[in-house]
Image (tube, grey):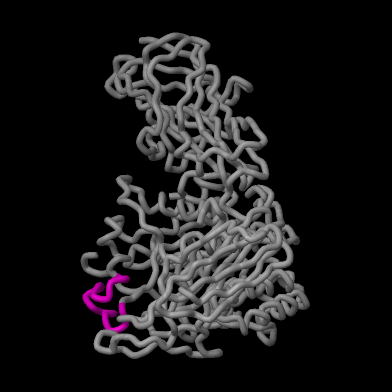
Amino acid sequence: MGVITLLALVVSVGTTSAAAPLSAAATAAPLSTAPASLGGVPTRVSVPASDDVFISQAEPAKSFGAATWMSVCGATCGGSSTGRRIALTRFKVSGIPANAGNVKATLELTSARTTGATLSAREVTGAWTEAATTWKTRPETRKAIASHQGLTAGVPVSLDVSSAIAGDGTYAFALTQPDPTTAVLFSSRETGDRGPKLTISYTTGTTACAALPFDKPSAAALRASAKKAFAFYFPPFPVSIDNKDPAADQYASWLDPAGSSGLYQDRGGYLRDRPPVRTVRPEADWRRLDFETEIRQAVAQGLDGFIYEHHTSSDQRWNQLPKLLDAAKNVDPAFKIILSPDFPTAAGASDAKMISDILLVKGHPSLFTLPDGNVLLAPYTIERQPPAWWKKAQDKLALQGMKTSLMTIFGYWNGTGKTEWDPYVYGHSSWGANRPEVTDAFRRASEAAHDRELKYMAPIGFEDTRAKELHFWEARNSSTLRGSWKAAIDGKADWVQLVTWNDYSESQQAPSKVRGDVLADVNAYYTTWFKTGKAPAIVRDALYYFHRSHKANAPYDTRKQTAGRFTIPAGPGAVDEVELLAFVKEPGRLVVKQGSNVKTKDVPAAGVVSFKVPMVPGTTPVFELRRDGATVQTVRSQTPIRAGVTYQDMIYHAGGGTACSS
């Protein structure tokens, strides 16, 4: 049996920056590796492995965490039919700037001997620890992303693993050996410089192409802020419900008026949007991998975690919290999950099931805890039970070894009343950010909470449109979103929560098929402002649009949409406007074209500018930025404005971005 000593492992990494019933039959994307423009500044930083270990099939219960070497061997290593060995190594990456370009990721190994063996690198998708992982408890891995045959003593070998890297975060690789008998040995991190390293290389510069209009600080820099940003996660609407072809999956059924056995045919379907489509995953643990995708999306927006509505149910969509917690641990151990426990609302109802559900994840490292070690609970519409009911539940949890604190999420709170809750809670929050007219109330609520010496978590809303109920509240394009952020910043809120991340039946801000990454980009800008205390400088032009696909009073087919017209339960009436939200790095002229209807607005200085014009049916809007008589950027809407429709669609569509992304 040949033996090879590998002196170092180097990874060179670069980056750019209540539910409907189910029908009976119904990632994070890798960073761009497009080259930066000429003039970029090269950067190279090496990071040592945070963990590494090898595991042995021949000794399945043994941990090799204390070993100073790692061994990789094929299926019949040592003449045994159970001789396989796998090495695992983990790296924590932070500080990759948003405008990084000219990127690549390579896994580099240096052999101590010459052999014809093949070495493969795989992504690790399961949880593992250096101290305790054994063959029996080994994590799942994906298919090989890179391989190299033939090693020469002292000569580095490079494996391209660019597809595994999605920006700041935690990455783990498994080294496997497809050759049946050859063992590959290399030094572990305990040996110092000879151990695994992650070398990050990229270029930056003012001419680099980037997807955001500002230079976003690293995840580590944003995470260091005392201000925290979360998003409310609604379990019925994950990336995929059934891991089927997107053309025939559950979301396709909900979007189809005839889907769900025709249950919502009289209103055009249950939903009007869905998560971005993906192909069917071959991995058994596809739900956790989908959670990892969403966590990377959230981290890219500057978020610190999810607030997860939690209870167990016969509907498996509600039973995935352990997978989400494991996904957070895998992707970014600093990304935390706040529990929002579901609870009975009848007077005097038992808290037994709620407590049992909470204790299912007791002690998980990805649960959000306060500085005193208490697990934070943030129940939605907490006021449906009185403070004394919650205090008794907390006492019972404490007897089970789980001390907790409460953050209220009231159905609506503008800063007045609710004083009976103050002695029981860590802070206050609210739902209800669904139209511009109410957003300033959350500034007042923040001030009131601080007057009571409590923390405040401001709601950040975009819109609230419910096809299932034929209801919508007029959000006025991006006005509710921007107004929510203004209230949080002006009111000096301690935390914010996006309401919601993924409730596609009401209001979601996660990347989606209809709106792409537009809300992610805008939220990244305001999250940076919120956490740093300063509006980010606009260094790249970006044009984003927001508009509906028809006027609110456009005629629809009453023979098919038989349940009636969409109505507004509260607030002002509908507004039929097209909005261009421009991030401009210097003065210019904004142009909105709807057929022969052309409107312009001069922008005298760099900044963020909202330009709204009346909607013109029968056209497809085109948006331009001009300077010195020349057009410097053009974005064409992906949503034509129709004069009449079969079914109403009252959600706001969106698109655009920088010249790189639009």
Indicate yes or no whether the magenta region holds residue 532: no
Residue 171, position in %: x, y? 51, 39
**In this picture, residue 115 sits left or right of residue 75:** right
Residue 590 appears anywhere in the view: yes
What is the quadrant of residue 369 in the picture?
A: bottom right
Name the residue at the front extreme. Answer: 629
471 lies above or below 653 = below
Residue 380, position in %: x, y? 53, 75
Indicate yes or no whether the magenta region holds residue 259: yes
**In this picture, residue 172 sits left or right of residue 493:** left
Q: Identify the residue at horizontal 70%, vertical 77% (top origin).
A: 443
**In this picture, residue 630 sits left or right of residue 279:** right
Residue 278, position in %: x, y? 35, 53
375 lies above or below 574 = above
Residue 342 appears anywhere in the view: no
Q: Identify the residue at horizontal 28%, vertical 89% (top origin).
A: 558
Q: Identify the residue at horizontal 22%, vertical 68% (top origin).
A: 24
User: In this figure, what is the number of numbered marks?
Assistant: 0
Quadrant for the N terminus, please. top left
What is the quadrant of residue 644 in the picture?
A: bottom left
158 lies above or below 373 = above
Residue 256, position in %: x, y? 28, 72
Q: Identify the residue at horizontal 53%, vertical 68% (top origin).
A: 545
Query: In terms of depth relative to the viewer, which is nearer, 7 or 140?
Result: 7
Query: In terms of depth relative to the viewer, which is nearer, 632 or 647?
Result: 632
Residue extent of the magenta highlight: 254-268
